[in-house]
Image: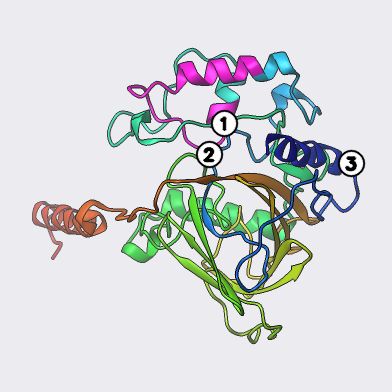
């Protein structure tokens, strides 16, 4: 089992040198993928992503796709030190950079109020890779197009100059509608997925925000271009043991690192061992990036159950923020001459 998973990781590094980013999954190392009752490759179960590998390759490792054995051992040891349950929560890619940089005590940039401690996060795992991105070979997102850069600058300016007027001005993650990335790249925090299979469709439920993607396998075309959806419009097919999911029709509110409605996502799911699911996706959006990019992840089978993601405690968070703002506005009006 471990050998097959390591072969997948090794293939990821080699694939980074290929023009296509190695979109196809590697050949199995003698592992026979089990079948469902209707003969499909069996991908069912609860899978988790607690990888500590960052999406993009950090500058500290230069252009190296892999850590040495000694470096990997040092990262694992340092990560264990800085992810103490009583310390600040180390979200996302921060844990890799902090561990590699030999930080002895992690300090969140969120400040003291409202910050998490690390008790709420799962333990992270590491392998030799220095980035999840395998194409471009430098392990980094392609450059943003001028149009995308203009969108990013306009959004940043609006955030600085115009406070939110209502809940619609807050991001979808804060509103408990959708995580910050699609597909969800956040690891270690509600990073579980459950796959269900039927003869004509596959469903993927995400623990974070608890949305469900239902993916038809019957060859039907995508919906019309005028219809945009938060999770896009997905169509699936089997290529040998690999489930290939083609997704288009994203809405103006969908987001993958600043993507637009032109995003075209191709995902590949392959069971590479009894407890490991290889997951590869290629994102194409020439309105946002100058060329497509590909990332690889390893998801681990877990015996844990999916839990309710309640998001806001009692779902009063935004309501209280808004009602508090109205009180402040009333106080300002009462103390400002000539204002109603």
Q: CA distance from mark 2 to mark 1?
A: 6 Å
11 with respect to 148 (left or right) = right
Residue at 60% across / 56% down in the picture?
A: 256
> Does the residue at mark 3 contact the one at mark 1 (Cβ under 8 Å)?
no
Question: What quarter of the picture does the N terminus occupy?
Answer: top right
Residue at 39% across / 51% down in the picture?
A: 305
**What span is in magenta?**
73-96
Which residue in the protein does label 3 denote?
17
Residue at 66% across / 78% down in the picture?
A: 217
Q: Position of residue 59 (x, y in %)?
A: 71, 27
Neighbor class of circle 3 (other Cα within 10 Å; few <14, some 14-19, many 20+) is some
Which residue in the protein does label 1 denote?
125
Task: Identify the image's colour scheme: rainbow, by chain, secondary structure or one colour.
Answer: rainbow
> Does the residue at mark 2 contact the one at mark 1 (Cβ under 8 Å)?
yes
In magenta segment, residue 205: no
Between residue 48 and residue 332, name the one nearer to us. Answer: 48
């Amino acid at each position: 089992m471990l050998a097959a998973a390591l072969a997948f990781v090794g293939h990821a590094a080699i694939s980074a040198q290929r023009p296509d980013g190695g979109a196809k999954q590697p050949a199995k190392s003698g592992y026979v993928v089990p079948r469902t009752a209707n003969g499909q490759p069996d991908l069912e179960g609860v899978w988790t992503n607690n990888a500590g590998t960052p999406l993009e390759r950090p500058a500290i490792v230069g252009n190296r796709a892999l850590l040495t054995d000694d470096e990997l051992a040092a990262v694992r040891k340092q990560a264990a030190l800085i992810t103490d349950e009583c310390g600040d929560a180390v979200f996302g890619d921060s844990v890799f950079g902090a561990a590699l940089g030999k930080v002895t005590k992690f300090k969140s940039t969120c400040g003291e109020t409202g910050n998490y401690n690390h008790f709420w996060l799962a333990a992270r795992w590491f392998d030799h890779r220095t980035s999840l991105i395998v194409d471009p070979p430098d392990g980094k997102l392609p450059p943003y197009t001028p149009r995308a850069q203009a969108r990013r600058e306009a959004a940043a300016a609006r955030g600085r100059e115009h406070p939110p007027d209502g809940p619609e001005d807050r991001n979808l993650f804060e509103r408990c509608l959708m995580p910050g990335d699609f597909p969800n790249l956040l690891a270690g925090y509600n990073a579980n997925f459950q796959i269900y299979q039927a003869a004509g469709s596959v469903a993927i439920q995400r623990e974070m925000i608890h949305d469900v993607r239902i993916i038809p396998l019957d060859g039907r075309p995508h919906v019309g271009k005028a219809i945009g959806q938060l999770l896009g419009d997905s169509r699936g097919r089997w290529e040998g043991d690999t489930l290939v999911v083609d997704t288009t029709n994203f809405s103006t509110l969908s987001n993958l690192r600043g993507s637009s409605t032109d995003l075209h996502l191709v995902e590949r799911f392959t069971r590479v061992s009894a407890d490991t699911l290889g997951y590869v996706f290629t994102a194409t959006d020439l309105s946002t990036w100058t060329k497509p990019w590909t990332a690889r992840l390893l998801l681990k089978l877990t015996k844990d159950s999916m839990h309710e993601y309640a998001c806001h405690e009692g779902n009063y968070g935004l309501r209280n923020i808004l009602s508090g703002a109205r009180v402040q506005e009333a106080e300002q009006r009462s103390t400002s001459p000539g204002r109603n």
